[in-house]
Amino acid sequence: MSEPLSHLRQNSSLLAFLLFCSQTSLSDTGLEYLNQLRTQAWMVEFRHNNPLAAAAGSHAYYLDINRNATPPYLSISAHTEIKGNPGFSGIDPGQRALNAGYAHKLVKENATIGKHDVRGAIDNLMGAIYHRFTFLDFAANEIGFSLEGISQVFKLGRSDLQQLCNQPPAAALSSVPVNCLGTPLTQNYFTQLCNEIPPHARFRKPWPEACPGGTLLNDGYMEQFCRQTPPQAIFSGTGRYYTICHGNQQIEAEWLEDFCRTPPTGANYDQSGEYYEICEPLVRVTAEWFRESCRSAPDWGRYTASGNYLQFCANPVKLREEYIEQLTRFRHKENPEIVLWPPKDAVNIPPAFYAEEPDPLPDYEVSGYPLSVQVNPALNGAPSLESFTLHKITDQGLERVEQVRLINAQNDPNQRFTHRQFALFPLQRLDWNQSYLANVKLKVNGALRLLNWTFTTQDPGGMLIYLNQSPNIIRITPGVNYALYWPPTVDLPTLPAQVKATHHPKIRVELTSIDFNTLRVRIQGKTCTPVTLQFSGIHKIDLLPSGC
């Protein structure tokens, strides 16, 4: 009988590094598994968030119902929804989060399409470098995810920004500076200044009639003087005199001149006569007091912000850019200075990388699993990568993997890397069940860091048979797992998508795709007829039960 098995890649422009099956139990939750991976990298764990999960669910539904639409889902972006399409829930990840009730739109999103459980989806995305960096984000600390059909979406957010948007403190709110005669002051300090104007700072008009020499006189004193003019000051009728008190009183000239030369206490006008109108409602204050207040403002009252603000909350509050940067820096400091992946002593690492959208390795259909180094943004100074090497650990010693490509911010073909992210791509897939040693020399803020760690690739789960090196007839033992492996070649980088198994009715054949180059096979039954596997007319092998 014939049993067709379509087991290989689904073409997709979505960011799907599509493998097929997970090595883990479906009962394990994705949050637990993702936190296991974060813990291996010494990063803070994620916590579940309901609005993020709702946003992930709506987008997963959109992807799933539109993937077979006309035009097909090849033209649908993984992160941008088109208004008018079925299931539309928001044009971008941030808007979808707001629509689902999340307090802010500074979210990140991973998505994949494929017939795998949540742990398999996480593994696939961790093997795709850009999406790995999303899961290993230094600031995110909460997540929601959802599966609809074969579409899975993960949405990452920040609880500190959630709290900020719901209850923003005064220190976080953006404000414009108050120009205090060229010195920018905060609005809070200027308000306090207005509320505490001392009596002597309030502007008083001088008496409108100055002394003969121009000396200004106190308005209050002169009001009293004019009401009760001293008799000796009043003009006697002969000689010189001055007319004051609004033209109502004649004063002996000599008396007034003596008075103005040495005014009695309270008579002299002690202000400059210049004033500023400040505050709300307007208050006239002396120019000399206001100038000194502006000049001597304490550091805490001076406006030192850039004036830039961010608006990302569900409500339209404007938040100081520096305040957000400080929050982000606190979040970064909760995580390690350097994050390595695969982590130290990791096992079951997939040996191959196939595809990602956008593709960091567009000229290779199959390559090795990428290694990555991320430097925490909380560390000052731009990091400099001195060297990044990979070695296979053999019985004879270390064997350097020569064919590699280092990707960083300078040569990333999609300009997604920051200057703190580095990845080493082996250009040939790694070996199954093989230990490797990675070495990194990294200079951070002038200090050299030497990083050395090992990891082991996945065991294929059965005796490995190299199809390109095996005869057309291969003897296998019934009830035993075998891994049929086709090493990538230029002409045949992966196994064909269609595999046909032809065998006797009394034989049961189990075929499971491990990756695009490897097929696990297990036969059951007692008969000496071979099982023929035909790979889309390109390659054919016969599996003959042992003992025949």
Image (spheres, grey):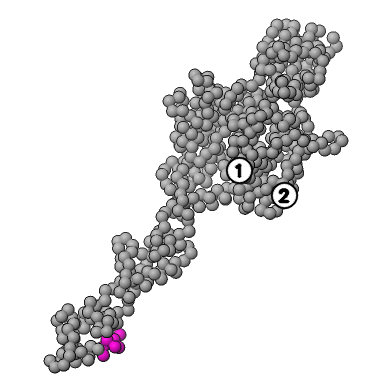
Instruction: Please give the label number shown on residue 2.
Output: none
Local crowd at mark 1 within 10 Å, few (<14), some, or many (≥20)? Answer: few
Taking the spot 57% from the left edge, 26% from the top edge, the residue there is 13
Gap in angstroms between the C-alphas marked 1 and 2: 19 Å
Taking the image as shown, residue 372 lies to the left or right of residue 328, namely right
Q: Quadrant of the C terminus?
A: top right
Residue with the most extreme right position = 396
Q: Nearer the viewer, residue 388 or 159?
A: 388
The image shows residue 361 at horizontal and vertical percentages of 65, 32
Taking the spot 24% from the left edge, 84% from the top edge, the residue there is 212
Taking the image as shown, residue 415 lies to the left or right of residue 80, namely right
The image shows residue 434 at horizontal and vertical percentages of 78, 32
Q: Amino acid at mark 1?
A: Thr
Whether residue 306 can be seen here: yes
Q: Amino acid at mark 2?
A: Arg
Please say whether residue 156 is one of the residues in the magenta stretch. no
Question: SS for tag 2?
Answer: strand
Looking at the rendered image, the disc whose residue lies closer to the viewer, 1 or 2, is 1
What residue is disc 2 on?
449
The magenta region covers 258-265
Q: Nearer the viewer, residue 305 or 490?
A: 490
Q: Is residue 425 above or below residue 76?
A: below
Taking the spot 76% from the left edge, 28% from the top edge, the residue there is 432
What residue is disc 1 on?
418
The image shows residue 333 at horizontal and vertical percentages of 61, 50
First of labels 1, 2 by sequence position: 1
